[in-house]
Amino acid sequence: MRDKSLTLGTEPYHSHLQQIIASFHDHRGRVLIAAHRGDWRLAPENSLAAIQYSIVAGADLIEIDVQRTADGQLVLMHDETVDRMTNGSGRVAEMTLEQLRALRLRQHQGGHDQRLTNYMIPTLEEVMILARDKVMINLDKCWAWRDDVYAVLLRTDTVAQTVFKSTAEPEEVHSFLNHKPQKPLYMHILDDSNEHHVERIGECCEMVRPEAVEICFEQENSRLLQPSLLQRIQQYGCRLWVNTMWDSLCGGHSELHGAEGWEWQLQHGFNMIQTDNAGMLRRYLDEQ
């Protein structure tokens, strides 16, 4: 049986997670914070340590990137290659888990100027065991092998705290979500690649029933930011997710401009914010 005695402050971790999940399902609930690739300021992005630091910093969700190895294992890595983040080179899809485990992660967001650490590339299963009963997880880069990912979530008993996302056609998403032993959580992405989904947003929400919609918009005048569209999405019970790490994702109103960027997004109705500064955003929201 799992040890649920770990605590976050004085509150049991699993109780804290249940509060996060309850807020997540309340589409007009409190603003939720998503840590982008974990707290990479303190440990390599997508590492077990970065995820642990994000939990301590008060993140509600942690966004991770999943790749599949040559021998069918699922690991965390944003890029298709290991060049930026490790002391190795090559494509993840052409390397075995054993080969990847021999590498070491570079600090922060990597690059050859960053020092090597003792951290290894984690498997998705290791990450889900760490996150279990503690924090929600948002899955990126993994739609192509979603069934393999779902099998890991079942095995680690983490389906209820993990959110898939994609820009896929509603019919494809519906086929994946339904007829599962436990229905996965899902967030639909709207960006330049599937802007035609704006016309189908009602059909999409009816067919897929996403818990949230992620909107990526480069300009303030983007049709993806029309108040009527945002209101319609919310009417279907969806939360609104925005990425504030850099300007091109959020109409020039990123966290690079300080708290003003977050304030702008809040004023436009977004209530899930992905950030590279989870601790700072937590302090900002607590002061409001």
Image (cartoon, rainbow, N blue to C red):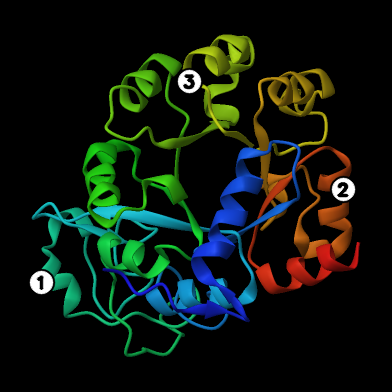
Which residue: 14% across, 66% down?
A: 97
Answer with the quarter of the image where residue 223 lies. Answer: top right
| Kind of element beneath mark 1 | helix
Numbered tag placed on residue 45 in the rendering: none
Residue pictured at 74% horizontal, 51% vertical: 31
Disc on the earlier residue, 1 or 3: 1
Query: Residue 9: percent from the left, percent from the top?
Result: 62, 81
- In percent of width and height, residue 153 lies at 30, 50
C-alpha gap between disc 1 and disc 3: 38 Å
Q: Residues within 10 Å of mark 1 (few under 14, many from 20)?
A: few
Placement of the N terminus among the 4 image quadrants: bottom left
Write the residue at 53% across / 79% down.
7
Q: Secondary structure at mark 3?
A: helix
- CB atoms at circles 2 and 3 under 8 Å apart? no
**Three-letter code, disc 3:** Val
Q: Nearer the viewer, residue 82 or 133?
A: 133
* Residue drawn at point x = 18 percent, y = 71 percent: 100
Dot 1 amino acid type: Glu
Q: Is residue 58 above or below residue 255?
A: below
Identify residue type, mark 2: Trp
Q: Which residue is mark 1?
A: 98
